[in-house]
Amino acid sequence: MEDGGKTAGIPLLDSGAALGTTSTVQTLANIVVSIVGTGVLGLPFALRIAGWLAGSLGIIVAGLATYYCMLLLVKCRDKLASEEEEDSTNRKTYGDLGYESMGTTDIQQALGGEFSFKERTAITSNIGGLPFAGGMAVFCFEGFGMTLALEGSMRDKRSFPKLLAQAFTGITLLYVLFGFFGYMAYGDETRDIVTLNLPRDWWALAVQIGMCLGLVFTFPIMVHPINEIIEGRLKKSNWFQDAENTNGYSTTSIGKFGIYLSRSMLVIGLAILASCVPAFGVFASLVGSTVCALISFVLPAIFHLKIFWSSLNLWQRALDFVILSCGMLFAAYGTYNTVVGV
């Protein structure tokens, strides 16, 4: 339904979000929905590969690093917005930040059932297991691309860092406990998707149905950053501009058709990709080690150095370089171990 150019819907995605109208509770719910996804089901398997102690520490480190880099994005967006004549803070997306801070060329270049501790590994002796579990942990903190939209949707933006810290604390604790108890329950029999360890009864079926429903209702939010980039480029294309000037058709209808078509193609493409995944654990670790590491750590550190270089002190520059270097090394080594096999 449309009313005066504003769309009624969930707070994060309607036009009111751009004006900063969502409450603290609504933003907290959006943060949880954006971050927590199917990756959590692979955490017990990750702890089986890396050991329950090493895996738990890996989850905590991934959570802290992701939280810090999300705040870097907000700082970079605010800096660029302050240098512009008009206030376009809430219209900046992750893609906009990349193009404005680095340019197109630079972006392309950057691109069992009994609980027994004696029978459960604390730290794996296989060094390749640590990057595998790290990639899985990074994958679990998905929704990084929603950072600017989440912050921009808040009524009181000054409370965003504190709210994000509270959300990450709770989510990280949940991840550690879920992975720990899942691994303790099944040990070396832990599957890459822990629900596959459940007995074949109606309780397990109810859990799987609930997961599917959760994915259906949260999927639109998860692809929101991708849609922002695709639709932004689409509206600037010559085809879109020419189509809107075509006689005999409503400008609104042409625009909606192009947007709906792009969204349909995205959903179909993701469905085909998901159906081709051979093993969830390996796939999640590979994506976490490559795409997620690039988006969550490498690029935010580059943006921050590029935009704030002259005002950063030695320690701030060193921290950004450490994050950048570790992100690159983690991506390379984690990808190698995932492809070769743990």
Image (cartoon, rainbow, N blue to C red):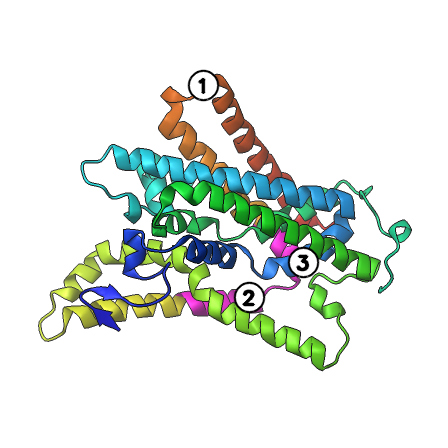
Residue marked by disc 3: 42
First in sequence: mark 1 vs mark 2? 2
Is residue 219 found inside the magenta-colored segment of the image?
Answer: no
Magenta segment boundaries in residue numbering: 266-287
Quadrant housing residue 58 = top right
Query: Measured from the top left, where is residue 202 in percent x and y?
Result: 71, 82
Please say whether residue 101 is visible from this viewpoint. yes
Please say whether residue 295 is visible from this viewpoint. no
Left or right placement of residue 160 versus residue 168 in this view: left
Residue marked by disc 1: 313
First in sequence: mark 3 vs mark 1? 3
- In this rendering, the answer to whether 62 lies above or below 219 is above
- In this rendering, the answer to whether 250 lies above or below 179 is below
Q: Secondary structure at mark 3?
A: helix
Nearest the viewer among 161 and 265 is: 161
Query: Measured from the top left, where is residue 127 in percent x and y?
Result: 76, 40
Q: Secondary structure at mark 2?
A: helix
Q: How far apart, in angstroms, are the residues tagged by discs 1 and 2?
A: 44 Å
Quadrant housing residue 261 = bottom left
